Image: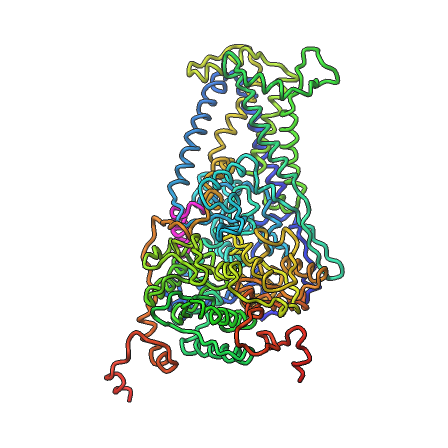
Amino acid sequence: MADTPKPDELAKIDHAPPLCRGWMSTPVDIKPGIYCYGGKEKNLATVDMPNARDWNPAEEDWKLPEDWQETVHDGFKDRLERFRSLKLFMDICVRCGACADKCHFFIGSGDPKNMPVLRAELLRSVYRKKFTLGGKILGPLAGARDLTEDVLKEWWSYLYQCTECRRCSVFCPYGIDTAEITILGRELTNLLGLNTDWISAPVANCNRTGNHLGIQPHAYKDMLDFFTDEIEDITGLRMEPDINRKGAEVLFITPSGDVFADPGTFTAMGYLMLFYYLKDLGLDITWSTYASEGGNFGYFTSHEMAKRLNAKMYAEAKRLGVKWILGGECGHMWRVLNQYMDTFNGPADFLEEPVSPITGTRFENANSTKMVHIIEFTADLIKNNKLKLDPSRNDNLRVTFHDSCNTARGMGIFEEPRYVIKSVCNNFFEMPAGTIREQTFCCGSGSGLNAGENMELRMRGGLPRANAVKHVHEKHGVNMLSCICAIDRAVFPNLMEYWVPEVDVTGVHEMVANALVFEGEQKRTTDLRGEPLPGMEDEEDV
Amino acid sequence: MNFMLSMLISACAAILVVLIPFIGVGALDLQFLFGVLIPYAAMATFFVGIVVRVIGWACSPVPFRIPTTAGQQWSLPWIKSSPVDNPRGQGGVVIRMILEVLLFRSLFRNTRLEYRNAEGSPKIDYEWEKWLWLAALAFHYSFLVIFLRHFRFFVEPIPGFVRILESLDGFLQLGILPFNGMGVPGVYVTDLLLLAAVTYLFLRRLYIPQVRYISLPADYFPLFLILALGLTGMLMRYCIRVDITAVKELVIGLFKFSPVVPDGIGVLFYIHLFILSVLIAYFPFSKLMHFAGVFLSPTRNLSNNSRMVRHVNPWNYPVKTHTYEEYEDEFREHMIEAGIPVDKEPEPEEEEKKE
C-alpha cells in the first residue's frame, strides 16, 4: 500500500492544467494511492460477472478478453439505446466549464481529468468516433479518438475517481449528470471484468450473506447481542431486538457497516434504543439477517447488479409478512430506494401505505415504495412529542451536519435531520453556504472508493468537505461532525484525523439515543461511547 | 491537440466560410447557388437534422426517475418543501424548466474556486462568479432580438413588433460615428451586446486555464461563425451598404418558394447569407443542439415522486437473485443454534446422516 503524503505536502495543488499539451495526448498514469485494487476472480465469478480473473491495474497486462473492443462497442450502443440520459449527455455538452471547479476530486487533486466535463469527454471522444458522422470523418478535429487499450485504462482510472455525488449536475445548465456517465461507464468496464476489489467483494458478500461485510446470520445476531449488553451497561435496561420475526408490522433495514465498525455501531445502538423506547407505544419491528444490507454496492457495478441486490428487501418484506419497511441512515442506499427501487423490483403491492404506529402519521411521500427513512420517522415522533429528550446530555458536543450527497441531490432530505439534531442537542452550527444542502461536498470516498489502498485519493477528494469542517471548528469550536450515511461514518474518521484531528464523527441516531430518557433507566453517567456525560466526569473517576 | 491548434483550425475553417462566397459570388457570379440553392439546402438540413436528432433522443427511454434534487423534498406536512428545486408534481417541473430555459438558473449558481495554500494549510473559498451567466444571457437574448428584427426583411409589410423592437433596441440613439446623421443609421444595443458577449465567451476560453484545456475546435468554430455573422451584418448596416430592397426581394422570394435573384446585391450580403447557411446546416450535428436537448434532460424535467408514484422502466427484465431459501439452506444450522427463526426445520434424515 502506498504511503499517503503528509497534509502539507498534499495541499500543494495546482489547478491550472498544462498550457501546451492537450489532454488527448497526455497518457494515463495509474498511480499508487489513487487507484483501487482489481476485483478478484472468485468474487466476479460468484455473481456471474464476465472475464473473472485476478488482475492488477498496476501491471501492463490487464488480461482483457480477445474481443474486448467489440464488447465495449456493443455495450455502448446498447446503453445509448436504453438510456436517454447517456445519449443526451454525450451530445449536448457545450464545455462551458461551469462544472470544472465544482468537483471535490478536481479541487483536491488539480488533475484536469477530474473536471467533470473532462471525465465525460473521455467517453464522449470515443462516442464521437464510434457513433457520429463528424467524428468518423474528422477524427481528432471533431474531438474524436479511437478506443485503444490506453484509452480504456484512462476510462477505468477516472471512472473510479468519481463518487457519483452529482454536485456538478447542480451547476450544469443542461443538467448533465456525471454520476450517470460514471454509472454507465462503469457498466462498460464491468463487461470486461474491470471492477475493483472493494466493490466486487462486497457485491459477492451481499449476494451470499445478505450484507457487504459477509457477516453470517449468527454473527450478525452476535453483534446485536453485544450492543444489547453495552446498552444494558449504560442504561440498566435490556433492549433485545427481534430478528427475522414473521408477522412484525415493520421491517428495519440499515447498512451493515453500522453493525460492524465504530462509530457506526453507536448509531446502530441508537436504533436499538429507539425501537425499544417505542415498543410500548406500539412499534412492532424486526431486523433481518437475509436483508441485512441497506447499502448497495451493486449500484457501483451496474444497474442489473443493483437490482439483484436490492431485490432482497421486498423479497424479505414479503416473506416476513410486514406492512412496510423502515430504512436506516445511509446515503446511496437512499438514492437507490428513492429513485430506483420501485422501478427495479416493484410494485410492492403486498405492502401497505406506511403509517407511524405511534403518531398515526401517514407517510404519503412513500406510499408507492412503502419505505420510510428513519430520519423522517424520528422527526415525526419528535414533532408529535412522543419522545422524552434531554438534549443537555449532548452538551459536550458542538455539532455540525454533513448533508450526504445522495440524500441531498438524489432525494432532498435537508430539514428532517436538522430538526432532529436541534431537538437532541443544544449546540448546532452550519458549515458555510455553498458547502451544504444541495451544494454539499462529498466525503470523497463514496461509490465504492472507501478502500484502504487509495487513501491519497480519499484525502484529496475529502479536502473541500474537511476544509468546511475546519472552518466551523475554528469559528465555533465544532467537535462533532454528524451525518446520516454509513459510508460517511466509515470514512470521515480517517478524513478528520488527516485534516481536522479535533473533530469526531457521529450518526444522528446516536445523539438521539443519548438524549432519549427512558422510564426506569439507571442514572446515565456515560454516553453510548462509554465517555462521561457532561457533568458526570467526576463520577466516571469513582 | 492543444488550444492553439484547435483555435487555428477553427479560425481557418471560419475564414474559408467567408472566402467561399467571396470568390463564388465576387469572382464566379454564382448568385443563384449562394442566394438560393445553398440557403435552401441549409434550411432543409437544419429542420430535418433537428427533427431526426430529437427523435433519436426520444427513442431512447428514460428507465429511471433521476431528477437532481436541489431543494427540500416533499415529506411531512409541517416541513416546508421546495416545489421548484425539488418538484413533487408536473407544475413544479414546468416552472423549473421555464427558469432553466429562459433564465439559465443552474448556471446562475456558478461560483469560482479560490484555492490558497498558506504554509501547508489549505484554504478554499468560493467566489462570486456571474459573468458566464450574464454573458450567456446577453448572448442568447441579443441573438433572439436580432433574429426577430430580421423579420423586417422577411415580411411585407413590416410587422408591428419589429418596429417596437427596433425602437427599443435603438434607444441609445447613438451613431456609429461620433456624430449622427450622414445617412448612417443609429446603433442597436443588441448588436453591441452580441459582439461583446461573443468576444467574452471567446476570451474566457483562452484566459481561464481549465476552460482553455477542455475547449475543442467544435467550441471555437461556432463562436467564430457567429462573430463573422454579426460582423458582416453590422458592416452591411453601418458601413458598406447593400441594396436592401433587392435583398428583401430575394429573401421574400425564398420564403415564398418562388426564388428570384435580383441584380446588384453586394457580395457582402452573400457572405452573410453563406455564413448563416453554414451555421444552421452545422447546427444539428453540433453542440448547438443543447437548445433542444435541455428540454429532454432527465435530471431537470422529471419530478421527484418516485416513492409516491411508480415509474415504469420499459425494458425492465427479470434478474437472478439469491433467494431466502438458498440463504437459509446454507446457514440453517447456524441460525437454529443462534436462535434465529427458520422457515424449514432440518429433516431428521439429514440429522442422522450427520451424526
Q: Residue at x 55, y 54 (%)?
A: A414
Predominant SS along the magenta part: helix
Image coordinates for residue B167, horizontal then vertical, percent: 62, 18
Q: Is residue B148 left or right of residue A429?
A: left
The question of residue A434 being in magenta is answered with no
Of the pair B27 and A225, the residue shown nearer to us: A225
Q: Is residue B333 placed above or below A392 in the rendered structure?
A: below
Residue situated furthest bottom in the rendering: B355
Residue situated furthest left in the rendering: B349
Image quarter where the C terminus of chain B lies is bottom left
What's the image's color scheme?
rainbow
Q: Residue at x 61, y 22 (%)?
A: B232
Q: Is residue B26 placed above or below A222 in the rendered structure?
A: above
Of the pair A36 and A173, the residue shown nearer to us: A173
Image coordinates for residue B179, horizontal then vertical, percent: 74, 15
Q: Is residue A503 left or right of residue A51?
A: right
Write the start and end of the magenta stretch as one range: A67-85
Residue A303 can be seen in this image:
yes
Image coordinates for residue B11, horizontal then vertical, percent: 60, 33
Image quarter where the N terminus of chain B lies is top right
